[in-house]
Amino acid sequence: MIMSGKEFPNNWQEIHDADAEDFGTCTFEEFREMMQLWHLPSSIACVMRVENKDTGKIKEHTYRRVSAATNKMTQLVEDPANVITIMDDTTIHHLMHPGVEP
């Protein structure tokens, strides 16, 4: 069951305005170990994060079907400013057009 935004509000401004000291640090090894623990629910095929380098906007999309994700990715790759990160339960793929700086 997908929850509505009312039950899980988007608190990005609160996080954006927080001081850097409010967040703990970790080594790369700790981060890599935590990354190994990532698991998507079986109902989710993939999560797609799209950053548009021209506008600075970042959007995330969650898909239950690979076909729906494929259709969206086909649409998104037409804009060379889009940097796309796709994550499924086993891998992370980072896609960008040649000449776009990360």
Image (tube, helix red, strand yellow):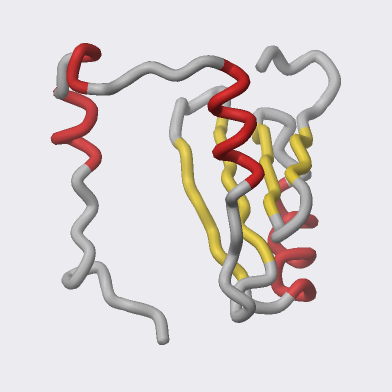
Q: In the orientation shown, which residue stands out farthest toward the bottom?
A: 1
Q: Give the percent coordinates (x, y) of residue 19.
A: 16, 15
Q: Residue at x 61, y 73 (%)?
A: 44
> How many circles with numbers are drawn on the protein?
0
Q: Give the percent coordinates (x, y) of residue 94.
A: 75, 35
Q: Residue at x 56, y 34 (%)?
A: 51
Q: Give the percent coordinates (x, y) of residue 39.
A: 60, 60
Q: Residue at x 40, y 80 (%)?
A: 2
State the image quarter where residue 33 is shown: top right
Q: Residue at x 23, y 27 (%)?
A: 16
Foreground: 36 or 100? 36
Of the 4 image quadrants, the one containing the N terminus is bottom left
Of the 4 image quadrants, the one containing the C terminus is top right
Relative to residue 39, is residue 25 drawn left or right? left
Q: Is residue 88 above or below residue 100?
A: below
Relative to residue 20, is residue 95 drawn left or right? right
Q: Is residue 67 above or below residue 93?
A: below
Q: Is residue 3 above or below residue 87?
A: below
Q: Give the percent coordinates (x, y) of residue 52.
A: 56, 32
